[in-house]
Image (spheres, rainbow, N blue to C red):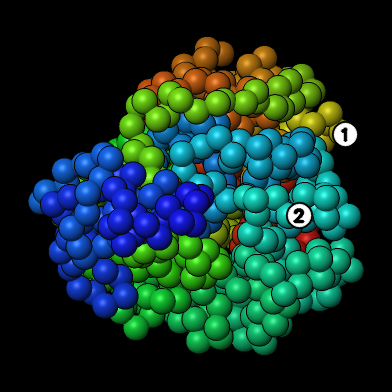
Amino acid sequence: MARLKDRIAQGRGDAPADLVLRGGRVFDLITGAFLEGDVAICGDTIVGTCGAYEGKEVVDVTGLTLVPGFIDTHLHVESSLITPFEFDRCVTPRGITTAICDPHEIANVIGTAGIRYFQEASQHLLMDLRVQLSSCVPSTDMETAGARIEAEDLAPLMGHPSGIGLAEFMNYPGVIHRDPAALAKLRLFEGGHVDGHCPMLSGKDLNAYIAAGISTEHEATTAEEAREKLQKGIRVLIREGSVSKDLEALAEVLTETTAPYMCLCTDDRNPLDIGEHGHLDYMIRRLIEKGVPPLAAYRAASLSAAEAFGLKDRGVIAPGKRADIVALGSLEACDAQMVFAGGVRADAAAFAAREVIPVVGRGSVHAPKVSAREFRHGGNHVDTDVIGVIEGKIITDHLYVDIEIEDGDKRPDRTRDLARIAVIERHGKNGNIATGFVRGFGIEDGAIASTVCHDHHNIACVGMNYDDMAVAANRLSEIEGGFVVVQNGMVLAELALPVAGLMSLESFEVVRERLVALRTGARRLGVRLEEPFLQLAFLALPVIPRLKITDRGMVDVMKFEIIG
């Protein structure tokens, strides 16, 4: 931060400001007014508005509207499939100047070393990356992860400059039923910030969860659910990721009345979606299109987010606040023309000047080599539990379908859209392989597979052909993890993710191109989902209702138990 006396002198106009933005208008998120005059910046801090200033550097923003930098209140950088440095380069120019991340994806693979990597990386980015400490590694005891993190492991990580508090507490049954390990983590952060994660929780169970000290929640998927959570004092984060798309359902809840208690987040959004649609900028555009007042949308994107997470130094363009500023062509288009993060213009030169640290988590895939026979699925009766995919949601249906047993195997059936799904433990712990059925991919041939498999990140595979499923799974071991599409024994498309089996070493532009090829390859197999790989990843997360699968078997999430 700039020296105190310099900030005061430049704010008063007694000395030229380090930087002056001249000719634009400021959208004031407190009064809703448009303010005329220069914006003066000293170092990383706004020191003057609504006046005329001289500056060592003057940037002409004539005709543009200035708004505070956007704050993504919950995401996993790993799910962008790129490193924190490429994520910064990908989304900061769109106006995202603060991102609050939970590194539990990499933590599930390599433990606290993954969290420390993100903490160190945060010190070298243009954006302000805030690193929450992961609360549930693994998310439950119904899966095999690469690491386990308890309260005593989190304690040494506390106090880092990037920290805010405890990340999403996914094990909500552990909270409401007072599991000792869950309570130990909550006590460690008592009085501080704790993020929530409680899909479809309501009534007294929701009361108990919030009473544990949890203050934010991003899993509301209906307006009714969001309203109950707001009425019980928890701040609701509207989520629009690559798979879980809740904006359409929750837009009606966001008004100028509720905006102080609602925020925006992406949770999981990849470079393909960002390139084709956008990030938080897309959410703001779409909310306004759906009739949300611009003041409410922009408050949720910045000021309300800052207040919700205790970031008192940002969220408005005003003296004393961090110089996170987005210059827009129009509020409705949310089209960033210039972005300043901590007073630094987010351009190619600024990104090139960053110090990039070495990655961690190489060589993390230790899966057994599999053959077609491992994908058979036996049974004693035809009645079969089937995961029902709901496109645009990470919740699933729990279906029951009669599937005949032939030669000791229940076979996939393309005529009824019944595909084989399998999860293969890849951390070298036990070599578990679980199989089941899924409906909703539309796959007619071949196989797709991924090591992005929430949150344990084992290998997940969906297919109609067992031989192709084996080729796909084995190929992931060869490329250190990633995504792959296979047909007739041939790899049609792939994306290597050698950083813990989660992130690429390539630029976000290259990753975007390969995601296009993967989508094309998947469609060649008949897959009709817009984002099949991240949809697949969430089918293995046993804290999201209703039916999921891990390496230990099918999981009835409503009963919180393995059913086979």
Q: Residues within 10 Å of mark 1 (few under 14, many from 20)?
A: few
Q: Which of the 4 quarters of the picture holds residue 518?
A: top left
**Identity of the residue drawn at 71% across and 27% down:** 361
Disc 2 is placed on an element classified as loop
The answer to whether residue 361 is seen in the rendering is yes
User: Hey, what amino acid is under mark 1?
Assistant: Asn
Earlier-in-chain disc, 1 versus 2: 2
The answer to whether residue 515 is seen in the rendering is no
Separation (CA) of disc 1 from disc 2:
32 Å
User: Hey, what amino acid is under mark 2?
Assistant: Met
Disc 1 is placed on an element classified as loop
Decide if residue 353 is on the left or right side of residue 217: left
Q: Residue 243, percent across and down?
A: 46, 49
Task: Return the residue at label 2.
Answer: 158
- Foreground: 106 or 145? 106
**Identity of the residue drawn at 78% across and 42% down:** 112
Q: Nearer the viewer, mark 1 or mark 2?
A: 2
- Foreground: 437 or 147? 147
**Identity of the residue drawn at 82% across and 70% down:** 187
In the rendering, which numbered label is found on residue 430?
A: 1
